[in-house]
Image: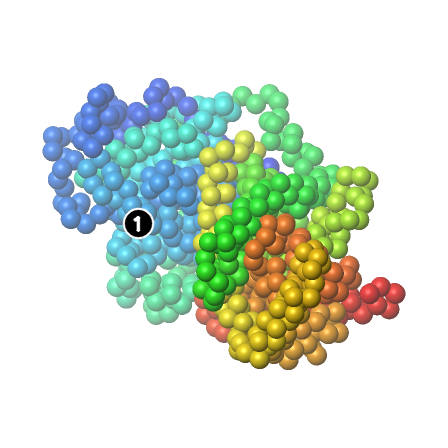
Amino acid sequence: MELPVTESNSPTTPATLTTPATLTTPATLTTPATLTTPATLTTPATLTTPGRSGPLQPTTGAPADSPQVTGVPTGALNAGPHVRRTEPLHVALCGNPNTGKTTVYNVLTGANAQVGNYPGITVERRTGAHRGPTLRWLVHDLPGCYSLTAHSPEEQLAFLALTGRLDGPKPDVAVVVLDATNLGRNLFLLLQIAELQIPVVAALNLMDAAEHDGWVIDIAKMTTVLGCPLVPMAARSGRGVDALRLAVEHVAHDPQQGRGPQPQWSLEVQTAIAAQRRTDHPVAATDGELVWQLGTDVQPSPRMAASTGASGGPAGQVQIAAGDRLRRQLVHDRYRLIDSWVGQCVQPPQVTTPSHTDRLDRVLLHPLWGSVLFLAAMTLLFQAVFAWATPMTDAVNAAMGGLAELARGHLPAGLGRDVLVDGVLAGIGGTLVFLPQILILFMGIALLEDSGYLARAAFLIDRTMARIGLPGKAFVPLLSSYACAVPGIMAARTLADPRDRLLTILIAPLMSCSARLPVYTMVTAAVFAEIPKVGGVLAVGGLVVAAMYVLSFLLALAVGAVFRRTLLPGHGAPLLLEMPPFRRPQLRNLLRVLWERGRLFVTETGTTIVALSVLLWVLMTFPRLDHDTVAHQAARQHILTTIADPIASQSALAAAEATAAQTRLQHSIAGQLGRALEPAIAPLGFDWRIGIGLIGSLAAREVLVPVMAQVYGRGSGADVDDRFAADIGHTMAKAGALTPLKGLSLMVFFAIAMQCLSTLATMRRETQSWRWPALALVYLNSLAWLASLAVYQAGRALGYS
């Protein structure tokens, strides 16, 4: 993401800004960069519109579906040439990153789109329905961007959507969400949208924060200079939402009321516009689009060029001839207006002491103490995931064990009962048993994000990222990949440089996603749980898992450095990221994140696990060996008739059942596949039974646990309720399949290997080629095999087994 820059005597913004007060777009602002709006509004519902003598507000007692607006002619809300009666009203939500735009979207549509105190959360367009006072709406949440200059994919997407070139009509109204604590910078985007002749409503969000900080804004005067409705809001608390709904429909019925601020171009810009208009340029229908093309200084994407005609032909030659000087003049003309408006309408706070954000940043952004606190926060999160979730995990295990026993006790014996208990219920149990850990992980990430800390973490890690030629902004998709590589790969769209984006996509699967948690839990519970805690506090299992996360990240840096010097040469762009203020996390947002992440894990991942559990049950059950079944029945009968002691009889029957199960498994389809794979994985410390799990986990990593449950006969009956993963791990340890060394080798393999079809499909979609997913599949699995081989063979050389 690049911001417009102009030559000026004003200080420029360094690439690694660390305080919100210093992040600006162009350098022509004569007022402080955070100089923005505030708080003279007497009621949240009051709405002032240009050219009216009084405020617009809902009449007391008026029904919600038939609002009355002061100053609007009778019947204006029910008619208007620009409003379709049968089709919904198309409303585009625009704004700078981290202005609360997606929060406004959630409030209007009732959706649960992810929000966060971090720029770049929205990476694609979202659409939701809303029932306005008199019209049906389709609300389009566009990616946050600082301008429409098309330096980044989100800026290109926003421009195409606003001009009706992106799978839909041009919006009827654009709601531009402004940060009331940074109005000077936010108005740049509003000016650009108004230049495109789209009716505009300005939503002045974060008014509560502005009032708290002491900003004061003259709402009526600002409304007059902007030439469009200005709605003060605090979307997180719902303040101003009703006024926004009224304003949007008022502008939809009377587009002139949302005409917005008109540019005051210098003579040089006017001359360039006239020259551009004279060229053969049929696509650009408005002066605003011509100005956009004059101000675009980057090579457009093929889709962008096809949609706008921004390159090639006479128009493209005029654009190239314009040069940097004209683009700087465009920015200067806009900010001359913005500086004037802010100077007239805004009174900045009388700052006497550093804010709490500044005081915290002195510690959290310190090169030494900031890094120490970052590592401490990550360690605490991993301890919570692996040590504090035990009671909840036990409860889930007990419930699933009881359900399996109930099914076994009330259903007749046969294939139907076996597939239900050993296939379906085993798969469900293998999903739900890890839900507590996953919810704790997401809650921790949501707390860090909502508080504003994650942006600080990006700055702390920027120097490390630069060593492999990646910008610090790549920290966002890489961090998202710790939850799931799929959204992490999609979040790479926020990187402007195609090589940066591709490099991030290739190393994102190395981040230890939540699907690896079940495997880590199974191994640590089996071979590390009995080791005394370090210092009597830190569980060794938690430290080992933390080491897996560190290993995967260091490997990502190493692989990225190699790719940067070979396949994708270049240098990462400097980090330019808005530093949000610290805010108290909202319980509602945390609960929304937990609900959405938990629901996705259960419905999407769980569905995969259950389906594969049933498939693996089939592979491990067939072909059925009739002669072995007869021999097993004869052995049972012999035990019952020759052993009188009930306890000894039950023990002998269990041993006979285990022997028969192993015989069936060895001769099953799955057993034959596992044995075929065994020569390749034996040097890693794995046997043919783990080979079956590796085959199943190619679709999804977490499938390994329910597969091992079935392989070792722990997927049915009372066995399920005995701490599912720990029980499976202990069973494998007793069978010799898991030792501390073998368990560590298995964890290293799973920390690196590509075992997710969804990730490969997402890579194909984002890169528009199978070349890069194929490369990822080969290099990740080869690297996993080599790393696991090194760990196991080195351990054996040191005398471990």
Q: Is residue 64 left or right of residue 621?
A: left
Query: Label 1: how many residues lie within 10 Å, few (<14), some (14-19) or many (20+)?
Result: some
Q: Which residue is mark 1?
A: 196
Which residue is pictured at 54% across the width and 78% down the height?
626
Numbered-mark total: 1
Which residue is pictured at 46% across the width and 23% down the height?
211
The secondary element bearing badge 1 is classed as: loop
Which residue is pictured at 74% across the width and 41% down the height?
372
Point out residue 1 in the picture as x, y percentages from the top left corner: 50, 52
Point out residue 535 in the picture as x, y percentages from the top left corner: 82, 40
Q: How is the image coloured?
A: rainbow
Q: Quadrant of the C terminus?
A: bottom right
Q: Is residue 633 left or right of residue 157?
A: right
Point out residue 257 in the picture as x, y percentages from the top left corner: 23, 36
Between 405 and 546, the residue placed more toward the observer is 405
Residue 359 visible in image: yes
Residue 1 visible in image: no
Compared to residue 535, the image places residue 780 above or below, namely below
**Callout 1 amino acid:** Leu
Between 585 and 534, the residue placed more toward the observer is 534
Point out residue 574 in the picture as x, y percentages from the top left corner: 60, 53
Compared to residue 87, the image places residue 412 above or below, namely below
Which residue is pictured at 43% across the width and 33% down the height?
236
Between 648 and 530, the residue placed more toward the observer is 648
Q: Is residue 403 left or right of residue 61?
A: right
Q: Is residue 674 left or right of residue 339?
A: right
